[in-house]
Image (cartoon, rainbow, N blue to C red):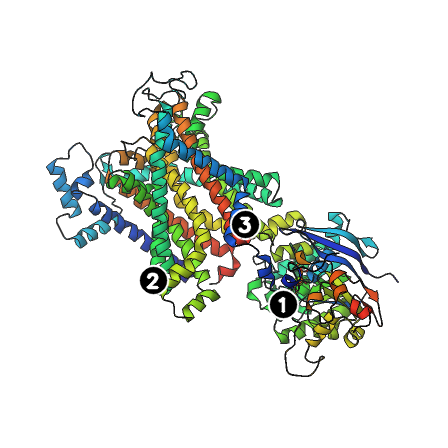
Amino acid sequence: MKQPTAETAPAAAGDPATAQRVESPAREAWRMFSRNVPALLGVFLLALVLLATLYGKLFYGGDPFEIVWAPYEPPLTTPSVPLGTDYLGRDIVAGLLTGGAPTLTVGASAALITMVIGISLGSLAGYYGGWVDNLLMRITEFFQVLPALLFAMVLVTLFSPSLWTIAIAIGVVSWPQTARLTRAEFLRIKELEYVTAARAIGARNRRIIWKVILPNAAPPLIVSATLTIGVAVLFEAGLSFLGLGDPNVMSWGLMIGANRDYMLDAWWPVTFPGLAIFVTVFAVSLIGDGLNDALNPKLRGR
Amino acid sequence: MTPLLEIDNLRVTFDTRHGMVTALDSVSLHLNAGETLGVVGESGCGKSITALSVMGLIPQPPGRIAGGSIRLNGEDLVGAEPARLRSLRGSDVAMIFQEPMTSLNPVLRCGDQIAEAVMLHQNVDSARASRLAVELLDRVGIPAPAQRARDYPHQLSGGMRQRVMIAMAVSCRPKVLVADEPTTALDVTVQAQIFDLLNEIQRDVGAAILLITHDMGAISEMADRVAVMYAGRVVEQGKADDVLDHAEHPYTRGLIDCIPALGRRDDTLREIPGVVPPLHLLGDGCAFASRCAHADRRCLAQKPVLTKWRHHPVACHAVEEGRI
Amino acid sequence: MSLSFILRRLGYGVLLIFGVVVLNFLLIRLAPGDPAVVIAGEMGGATEEILDRIREDYGLNQPLTTQLAIYVGNVLQGDLGQSFFFNQPVSRLIAQRIGPTILLVLTAQVLSILLGVFLGVIASRKPNGPASAFVSIFATIGYAVPVFWTGIMLIILFASVVPIFPIEGIQSVRLRDAPLLVRGLDIAHHLVLPAFTLAVVYLAQYARLSRASMLDVLGSDYIRTARAKGGSERAILFKHALRNAALPILTIAGMQFGNLISGALLVETVFNWPGIGRLAFDSILRRDYPTIMGVLFFASAAVVVANILTDLSYRWADPRLREQ
Ligand SMILES: Nc1ncnc2c1ncn2[C@@H]1O[C@H](COP(=O)(O)OP(=O)(O)OP(=O)(O)O)[C@@H](O)[C@H]1O
Ligand SMILES: [Mg+2]
């Protein structure tokens, strides 16, 4: 027979909410994430892509623009060009290893720009409400009307393609979603007791926004940031595919675009870069889903 | 006479992230034709789970009926075929839910929702069902029933919606009407009206009512018999007057003390200290021990069983040992 | 839904479209270099004569506000400028290509919603079953595959391995003068691969969304009420649940429209589909700014219209919003 221990009896008498939360939310989120097999697969795949992009050149040198072999060399036939060559005789492996850098850089910086714009505008709108909210939301709606890829294409063409232009263009077309999410979170959180309490003790608006509300709005924003990286990568790939990327930098999208006219002669130059894009975005969204499950308290069981 | 509805040793478990918890444990209740059985207890005691078990509506998974039986006219509902359960639901056993605000489908007209219940169990066409729906709305005291039938739920007040729920529930003249806190979400004045309506309906239809509530006052007005639940178990059971006048279990006494009119007449608002422990933290002892002034070592170590004591069955070591 | 609401919504739409016009105007002026040269595009060194004509037409020597007034006035008259590359008015270029794009986008939209909702509903029946697992995996994959690459893979597949669908264009040359029905079938035949390519991404998203939405709805109180009435699983799924679950799907469908146009741009490029996406691609390669701006204007206006339609149908579908 069990004696009442410190664990059962007093907890039973106390507030059930505190009794259930034996570990901190961050730890619990981490525990859930680290048990989520698809999310771990995502981390593994993304690590693979990052390592290949960062350190691939150390083990496999070669200029992706250089013509090293006869054109249309099929994969797995020649040891010096393991995945074959494209229509000009350029090495596909070299392209894959260097082609990730612009995509990932643009993806990450575009996501950053998106989050900065989106969170700033969304938090202002949600926190202050009134005409500020009204104005900012009308601007947001306006930007949501523009078909994103088309608008990004226009921006890139008008302001000459470089990695920066592309990242900014993607950021400019992607922020409305983040702004809306941030606003919704702010609207929800600013009504909660602890915000009223912070206001009651005379905290200034800046402090409430940054120190009180934003940290509590973080979970969905973290998830959204992750997914935004995936979207930005797809954007960059699409632009490069259309020939609107930086022409001096080899990227996965560019490889597909350049070899598109010859795809019926050789499937490999268009297939492998596409797989690389797919694996990257797939990994990122697996991670995003995993974070969502781990951070979204609604999904946690009773 | 065998009772109309007989719940015997019912045990319901849920899979949760804390492992399997037992939401109902050895619950035995019976309901005779035409009578009202009150089930009382604080929030989280398992009252709704009991009601849903009768309806065969325990969400599975995570829930599971792990043992016991529920017999309606001698027919066990626990192992019954889904099709058989469907044909009983709404016709022989019907239920009124706790939340009139969310229990009606927001995109369907009130009249259609009642007519649907009629058509499911009676052989009538839709025009006739619609007319019956309007009659039912009239019967439950809704003014301008023909117009209200065309309204959507959000256009009605909480009390009106609960009347619609009642109309739907009694549309097929059920033998057992389960009312799960039918008035909790309503204003005090509306509460009294709804109880009056339930009494009338019961006289009309002759249904037996399983009235779930956490309000001892409602019990004294409505119920013939009462079962007091705590943390998934029945802790005291008997004739309503008897239990109210001679409450034995400290928990029942606490509940009675909460009603100003029946308890001591001082001005302080009374309540039982502490809260119902979460199911996964239930130990081996009496679940009420941590809140009980009479608890001793035995209470913390061993679960009391429901045994007939002075007036009626009680599950309490202190009563058994004569300490209270 | 009141007329004044519709009018307000339309007025706001007009305002948004006006915003796009102003944005277009500003973009040309913000671009580095002489706006006349920008407008002339890369025509292999536009002559002074042409540049002068452009300056005249667009009022480039006058103050910015006058320029804007001229620009807006032109757009109001349906004049989106002159494409120097195609040597045609932009509005005519767009008018010629709008049909194929609408056909492609609407087919893809309908295909993805129907299939996606179907998959999602099936998956929601068993939230932990194989169908659910399939839907989530498929949704993640569909989301991660670049749409232009899907198209290319399908072209390679259908060009050599199973040549049953045409892989480019909108109709066969030899059937240009065939009877209407034959031509229609021919176009439908050509539509299969591009529409499917475009649909895959959104199909996956709709499947995932409708699964989540259905699960949400299936756990709600009114579904429990429908079960308590004794409704069949089918009635519960389609009559009670899907109608409610469709509301968020409708919202997303409206919001996706802009993305769908972006996707169509890539798909049209890959499949040589003669729509405005292909036109945008061609004109961007030639830096034919009037055409690019015209397409941007037109596509944005289409999104505004789609949003208004969604908004109105949403309000019509949800009785809670109907009389506001
Ligand atoms: N789906 C579920 N998963 C896990 N536990 C559940 C589930 N549904 C109910 N429970 C648990 O079963 C216990 C009894 O719940 P029930 O709804 O019957 O309480 P109740 O007595 O009706 O309370 P209230 O007065 O609030 O309606 C609660 O402790 C609850 O946590
Ligand atoms: Mg309940």
Q: Are marks 2 and 3 on the same chain?
A: no
Say which element carries label 1. Answer: helix
x and y percentages locating residue A227 in the rendered image: 43, 44
Q: For the residue marked with disc 3, what is the amino acid?
A: Ser
Residue C178 visible in this rendered orientation of the protein: no
* Mark 2 residue crowding within 10 angstroms, few (<14) / some (14–19) / many (20+): some
Alpha-carbon span between mark 2 and mark 3: 32 Å
Provide the residue designation for mark 2: A132
Give the chain letter at badge 3. Answer: C
Provide the residue designation for mark 1: B145
| Proximity of marks 2 and 3: CB atoms separated by less than 8 Å | no
x and y percentages locating residue C139 in the rendered image: 50, 40
In this rendering, is residue C88 above or below B301?
Answer: above
x and y percentages locating residue C84 in the rendered image: 21, 36
Say which element carries label 3. Answer: helix
In this rendering, is residue B260 above or below C18?
Answer: below
Q: For the residue marked with disc 2, what is the amino acid?
A: Val
Q: Is residue C209 left or right of residue B236?
A: left
Alpha-carbon span between mark 3 and mark 1: 33 Å
Q: Residue furthest left?
A: C48
Q: Are marks 3 and 1 on the same chain?
A: no
Residue located at (42% from left, 71% from top): A200
